[in-house]
Amino acid sequence: MKNTLPSLLFIICSLSFSPVGAQKLWTIDDCISYAMQNNITLQKSRLQLQTASEEVRASKGALLPTLNANTSQNLGYRPWQLDGMATVTNGQVNTKVDKTYYNGSYGLNAQWTVWNGNKNYNNLKLSRLSEQQAELSVEEQANSIQERIAQLFVQCLYLHEAIGVSQASLETSKKNEERGKEMVEVGKMSKADLAQLTAQRATDEYNVVEAQSQLATCKLQLKQLLELTGDQKFDIAIPPTTDEEALNEIPALMTVYEQALATRPEIGNKKLAIESSNVNLAIAKAGWLPTLSLSGGFTSSTNSLANNSWGNQMKTNTNMSAGLTVSVPIFDGWQTRSSVNRAKISQQQAQLDLLDQQKTLYQTIEDYWLDATTNQQKFRAAKITVESEQQSYDLLNEKFDLGLTNIIELLQGKDKLLSAQQNLLQSKYMTLLNMQLLRFYAAQR
């Protein structure tokens, strides 16, 4: 496809490196390129495009005259035939009675519809529009797959980094547990408080496993979208990202929408549907118009009982004809009127479908824009929150070592820090994803 989400690769600018190791690491470019060739749904859309192209060829053929050749060979038997053919040989008369005979007929017929209210020409125009719609449908399907790949890929990146946060939290919990054991031994902490530290460590271990499971599920969904079989190894390349990328300027809502109106295939498809409805209306109205057609034919026949040779019979029995036929509709039981009315209804439906598609497109872009704007604001706030919670937790650790705070406050501080770090990651990647989807909608071509 000519539109492969190049701007979506906000995290892919550093993905031109070669993967290290035997297993291939898939970049988002790799995923999109592979899906464009192997996704089954997309391949079905391309087959529908091929079918539409064949319909165009068939419509072109309907403008040409038709030519048919025919022949028939018949064998006959007359069991009670008494008369025959008499011949004289050496003064003697011989009579031959042919009870078995055969005859043949040969024909060549041509037919050409010269004019039928431009129905054939409009059918060709309609099939061409259908071909264009099928091509745009392939683009729609490709865009949908690319967006889904982008969402899954970014989700995998988020989960990968979330695992790092959970693992760092687990390491802190392990250190706190070890420190608690030492404090219990010297009598500075009760076993009940140590049990809380142990429970916190176990919870963090669970969180790491849960995050790893979510990442595995995300990669599996991405693998399935690429139509990779179960025995094929699959893992993604994890590029470095910076906070500055999430703080870039967000494209303006109306600018994205106006550009999307001019480039998105789903909008173009609905516009072509309106054109098709106009052509269908013209085809329906052709039912009130006369039809003019030309015909011509050649026929000949042979018979084994004739005195002439086969060649002479073909010549003498030749018959050629040509004709002009004009058919004028007078009354068809209101069939044409009903067809015209249905075509007008379809015309109005196509116009409403375009308006509905434009509305859906605006809502989609507005959702992306709102998500990008909101998450960018959350990201700015989350950065400050993480810094604050980190400082607070460091102070709680120092106070805990000095015996100036209890285990409850320490654990609460750790939970707040972990929550702030997770909020920071989520807002960062949601901002990046929605910003690049906006650019995808705006700069598709």
Image (tube, rainbow, N blue to C red):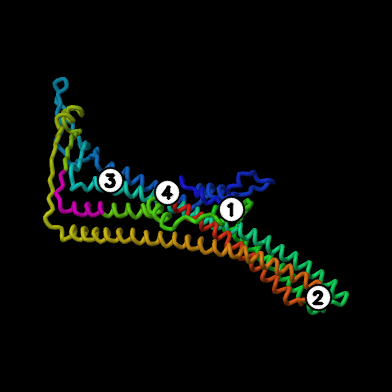
Q: Position of residue 138 (x, y in %)?
A: 42, 50
Amino acid found under the numbered disc labelled 4: Leu
Residue 179 or residue 349, whichever sits in front: 179
- Relative side of 409 to 154, left or right: right
What is the span of residues highlighted in magenta in the rendered image? 278-292
In front of the other: label 4 or label 2? 2
Work out whether mark 4 precedes mark 3 in sequence or the reverse, and give the earlier one: 4
Disc 1 is placed on an element classified as loop
Work out whether mark 4 precedes mark 1 in sequence or the reverse, and give the earlier one: 4
Residue 103 or residue 411, whichever sits in front: 411
In front of the other: label 1 or label 2? 2
In front of the other: label 3 or label 2? 2
Q: Picture quarter containing residue 246? A: bottom right
Q: Tell me the crowding category of disc 1: few under 14, some 14 to 19, or many 20 or more residues within 10 angstroms, Cα based.
A: few
Marks 4 and 2, Cα distance to the nearest angstrom?
Answer: 73 Å
Please say whether residue 295 is one of the residues in the magenta stretch: no
In this figure, which residue is indicated by the disc labeled 2?
Answer: 403
Please say whether residue 285 is one of the residues in the magenta stretch: yes
- Relative side of 398 to 160, left or right: right
